[in-house]
Amino acid sequence: MRSSEPLEIAVMFWAGGDPAETISELTRLGIRSGQLGLPGDLDLTCAPQWRDALRVADFRVYTVFAAYNGESYADIPTVQRTVGFVPPSTRAERESRTLAASDFAAVIGATGIATHIGFVPESAEDPDYVAVREMVRRVCDHAARKHQTFALETGQEPAAVLLRFIEDVDRPNLGINFDPANMILYGTGDPIEALDILGPRVITVHCKDGDWPDPAQPGALGQERALGSGSVGIARFLGKLKEIGYRGPLPIEREASDPVRRMNDIRAGIQLLSELR
Ligand code: MG
């Protein structure tokens, strides 16, 4: 597989459409690598088609992201109830799905998997905390057998709480996909300061932007924005990444639902990162 340059500009994108067409849309933007999300309802037997399309295009996937059926990011209470490994009723099904995402990643040659595990309870005595910790250990061990890392998407808990959880899981292939916008969208804390705490654990990042939640609306999430037009401060973010010695890719994540707007914003994001990098 093609090796990538340090701080290579990349894109977080989703499987679902034709693999060759999806990749060609990105290569037309000058993008040669990225992170691939697997929607919860995607039939994962399409892995060989993805492997072949990536090979033909000489396109590298660093990370396979697992998402799950039944998740909703409508507001913070809904996220707490539906997202990741935390809801007990979907835990077993989502563990199987995460292991299947690791198998998919092995087929396409990705060296990492990642997911939002949800709002982990702060107390290490909480039964849900213990169950999620054990589940993360099993996922790490499965991924390790395939020479993969497992990255937890940041944003839903303060940096110190996340770091304590990672240390408690105690697996060498466990780390973080650091998303600075999520920390703002969830009102968790200043993302640049969080990097001082989490830096050594960062495997990959998302280049995403957003604004803080409206304090007049308790439980509401902040608003995701096009890269450079939110509250992250992308120049400051890149400066801090360099300061902590991060040399991995810079995948742009844009969640706008209108596909034309999304591609336009990604194009502008590529331009911005090219200037700042
Ligand atoms: Mg993200």
Image (cartoon, grey):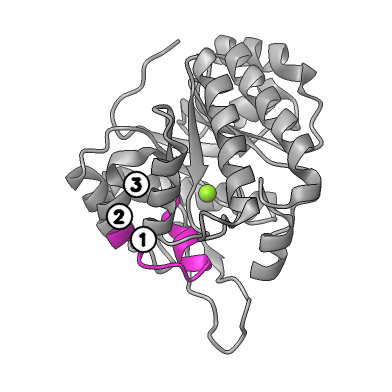
Which residue corresponds to the image point at 53% horizontal and 67% vertical from the top-left? 186
Q: Nearer the viewer, mark 3 or mark 2?
A: 2
The residue carrying mark 3 has its beta carbon less than 8 Å from ligand 1: no
Q: Is residue 218 left or right of residue 251?
A: right
Label 3 residue SS? helix
Position of 143 relative to 251 (above/below)? above
**Considering only order in the chain, which callout, 2 or 3, is on the residue closer to the N terminus?**
2
Marks 1 and 2 close (CB-CB < 8 Å)? yes
The quadrant of the picture occupied by the N terminus is top left
What is the magenta segment's predominant secondary structure? helix
Q: Taking 9 as reference, is 154 left or right? A: right
Q: Measuring from the top left, give residue 5's x and y in whole percent.
A: 30, 25
- Amino acid type, callout 1: Pro
> Does the stretch in magenta take in 192?
yes
Q: Is residue 277 magenta?
A: no
N-term-proximal mark, 3 vs 1: 1
Q: CA distance from mark 3 to mark 2?
A: 11 Å
Q: What residue does disc 2 label?
A: 237
Residue at (64%, 44%) from the top-left corner?
Answer: 131
Q: Dot 3 corresponds to which residue? A: 273
Q: Is residue 275 left or right of residue 2?
A: left
x%, y% of residue 259? 68, 49
Residue that extends furthest to the front in the rendered view of this protein:
125
- Amino acid type, mark 2: Phe
Q: Is residue 112 above or below residue 180?
A: above
Region of the chain picked out in magenta, as a range: 179-194
Q: Residues within 10 Å of mark 2 (few under 14, many from 20)?
A: some
Can I make out residue 225 in this image?
yes
Q: Is mark 1 within 8 Å of ligand 1?
A: no
> CB under 8 Å between callouts 3 and 1?
no
